[in-house]
Amino acid sequence: MAKTGVFESDPMVMTKATELKKELQRLVRNIVDDEDYRTETIDQARETLFALKELKMKRRSLSLKLRETVLCPEEFKCPLSKELMRDPVVLSTGQTYDRPFIQKWLKAGNRTCPLTQQVLSHTILTPNLLIREMISQWCESQGLELPDLAQHVNEEGITEADRDHFLSLLEKLSLTLPEQKDAARELRLLTKKMPSFRALFGESLEAIPQLLRPLSELKSRSSIYPDLQEDIITTLLNLSIHDSNKKLVAETPMVIPLLMEALMSGTIETRTNAAAALFTLSALDSNKTLIGKSGALKPLIDLLEEGHPLAMKDVASAVFNLCIIHENKGRAVRDGAVKVIMTKIMNGTHVDELLAILAVLASHQKVVDELGDLGAVPCLLRIIRENTCDRNKENCIAILHTICLNDRTKRRAMREEESAYGTISKLARNGTSRAKRKANGILERLNRAVNLTHTA
């Protein structure tokens, strides 16, 4: 006779199971009895069967979990989950936790032991083989099955086999050059294809420094191996895509200096990926400040000035993101961003991306002065006349509005444009809501200036 599970007596669960069985019987009967049954009936039967299986698995899982929780010795329970440990690991303080739950604690930014509140000397998690064996023996005595560690998957989809392979690759990065190159290449591919490998870097504070060791130990640019540098920098880019890694990656002391080095000395692929990594990391405001203070805007602007087609979009995206915060606007201006951007726009290069940066920078007073000296007003008015992109027109008129407010000497050029083409009036009628607002603001200023002249 089959054993009665803990949840067999749950009326809601039993009712749902009964309904699914009846529905399955009906569908199968239709398939068996009706020669002209529809293919949709088979699909419905399959879905009902899957739902019944899922309910059965859920009931079994809940039953086992309740039994484990009620019966298992306290020393086998994780202090965080209060449940039977599947993968017990030891923290640097000597306390044992179930791996998924202590990893979640560490990923939340905690650097203390949950039980003792001691500051951790490191975050390496060591398997507690003794407790694991004791739990295994207890489960066997209770007729419970503990998942094989090789098959145990945590919330990130990481198996023990993945973790062992990952650690072996990190170890190779401290060996001979050929082994470093092989390991770096494989980590690049794995972190591109498998989110679980990106997550593994968040488990230890030492993982990213180990990845960067081949580059951080080089004495000069001339000793850099381009393929090794490209693989490591691209792996950093892959890691930075993982939201949980952004803070950890940016705050690892070697990361931003090595990305800056890559911007200046790498292949164009390496330089592009370094810029993309800075863009991705700058999604966090705290990282924007950190990257700006490090001086990374200067090599980004230099690469922007070079204008390599492969790099332009990633570089422009990085500069735009960084300049959203006020303190980085001043840094970008000091590093020559306005002249570089305006020159590119006048040459018709990546106008969309660069106008967006210029619109962000325009609130800085020094930008208004530079734009006047660079002949920006006629250029921006021409773009509004000739460009079909609403977003570009909106950015142009926003920049012109700032110039109009802060530099009276440029209003004459705007009046002449308005008299000859009616450019600003057309935008005030047909532009986006923001463009209309800015255009009307300029027209009011120009009309007020004319009225004051006539009155005088």
Image: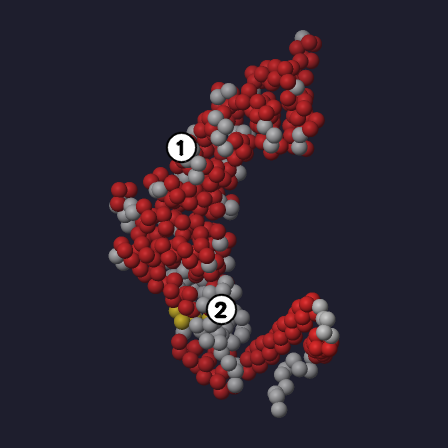
Question: Can you say whether 201 is above or below 269 in the image?
Answer: below
Q: Is residue 85 visible?
A: yes
Q: Is mark 2 on a helix, strand or loop?
A: loop
The location of residue 336, given as percent across then percent down, is 43, 29
Q: Can residue 51 be seen in this view?
A: no
The location of residue 349, given as percent across then percent down, is 48, 30
Residue under the image location 46 percent in, 81 percent down = 136
Give the left or right position of residue 252, taking residue 420 as reference.
Answer: left
Q: Which amino acid does label 2 sit on?
A: Val
Residue under the image location 38 percent in, 64 percent down = 165
* Disc 2: which residue: 153
Marking on residue 306: 1
**In which quadrant of the rendered view does residue 8 lie?**
bottom right
Question: Can you say whether 259 is above or below 50 in the image?
Answer: above
| Along the viewing direction, whichever of 322 and 345 lies nearer the viewer | 345
Label whose residue precedes the other's in the sequence (1 or 2): 2
Task: Please tell me how many numbered marks the rendered image carries.
Answer: 2
**In which quadrant of the rendered view does residue 54 lie?**
bottom right
| Along the viewing direction, whichever of 77 and 283 lies nearer the viewer | 283
Residue under the image location 39 percent in, 43 percent down = 269
Q: Is mark 1 on a helix, strand or loop?
A: helix
Give the left or right position of residue 399, taking residue 185 as reference.
Answer: right
Q: Which amino acid does label 1 sit on?
A: Glu
The quadrant in which the N terminus is found is bottom right
Question: Can you say whether 144 is above or below 213 in the image?
Answer: below
The location of residue 144, given as percent across then percent down, is 52, 82
